[in-house]
Amino acid sequence: MILVTGATGNLGKATIDSLINRGVSPNNITALVRDENKSAELRLKGLQIKIGDYQDFESLQSAFRGVDRLLLVSSSADISKRFEQHKNVINAAKESRVGHLIYTSFDMIDLQQSVMGDEVLYHARTADYLKRSAIPYTLMDNTMYADMIPFLIGKDILNNGVSIPAGDGRTPFLPISEMAEANAVILTTRGHENKEYVISAETAFSFAEIADLLSDITGKTITYHQPELSTYIAQLILTGASEDDAAYIARFAGAIARGEFDTNKSDVKKLLGRSPVNLKDFLQSIYS
């Protein structure tokens, strides 16, 4: 039995779809959800549903019984709670004798020295705790979602250009669908125990280069602007982010500017048997 946590979130749902596309029967997939009212779509697909909360250890123990492979999608709770929640999942998996735990970590040059501090450090702490847990594990070190680019760069790029204070820093953006397919490979094939994979594109792009790609796609010159931080935060709020989320995303821009995501590593081709989707092709599907 495969169990996917965060099953109503973007990566969880995409992983479930990838598992089904790889031929896994829906009744062999369990979706862990906090709110049963949000599970209707998953039930229609034929999945088993378990109710569990990362902060409720007993609910996790109950949900994990009989599970062979478990995908731990990192928590979206307050940053201060995430490591303790992940510990709950790992401890419950160990007590329930889960055979293999896959964790969606984060790919940066050094999580422990990042300018983002605790906002990414919990990934390193979780990975270290998992390695010491004696559960067979796989770490999926994910880069930033390519799906975030339209939100990061602002609306109406034809007139406003690309707007983000990210300097010349490069990021190997990868679509969620590619990350999900990599998760599905790990969950359905053998030989990945106690290994760590970098899930990123083979080529990293700066936002100036992304502006050039968008110029080619749209046939109009797209410029790259680096607004002041306060202006960028206001831009994100106008796009629909809360003040806290906007400030959080702006700190990612700072990390990008420092080159923290340009690790020059990718294991996607090894896992999928093909190169990752080209960023220009991905952007073409959005902006053409």
Image: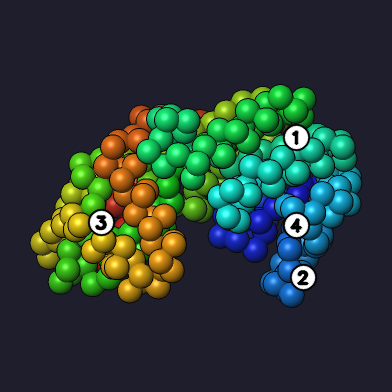
Residues under labels 2 and 4: Cα distance?
A: 11 Å
Residue to which mark 3 is pinned: 229
Relative vertical location of residue 21 with respect to residue 35 in this rendering, above or below: above
Q: Determine which residue is flagged by label 4.
A: 53
Give the Cα separation between the discs numbered 3 and 1: 42 Å
Task: Determine the residue positioned at 15% across, 71% down.
Answer: 159
Name the image quarter holding residue 206.
top left
Residue 72, x across and y down, in percent: 67, 45
Where's the C terminus, which quadrant? bottom left
Give the CA separation, mark 2 to mark 1.
26 Å
Residue, disc 1: 100
> What residue appears at the point 79 percent right and 54 percent down from the top-left corner?
56
Q: Is mark 4 on a helix, strand or loop?
A: loop
Q: Which of marks 3 and 2 is nearer the N terminus?
A: 2
* Residue 211 can be seen, yes or no: no
Mark toward the viewer: 2 or 4: 4
Query: Mark 2 touching mark 1, by CB under 8 A?
Result: no
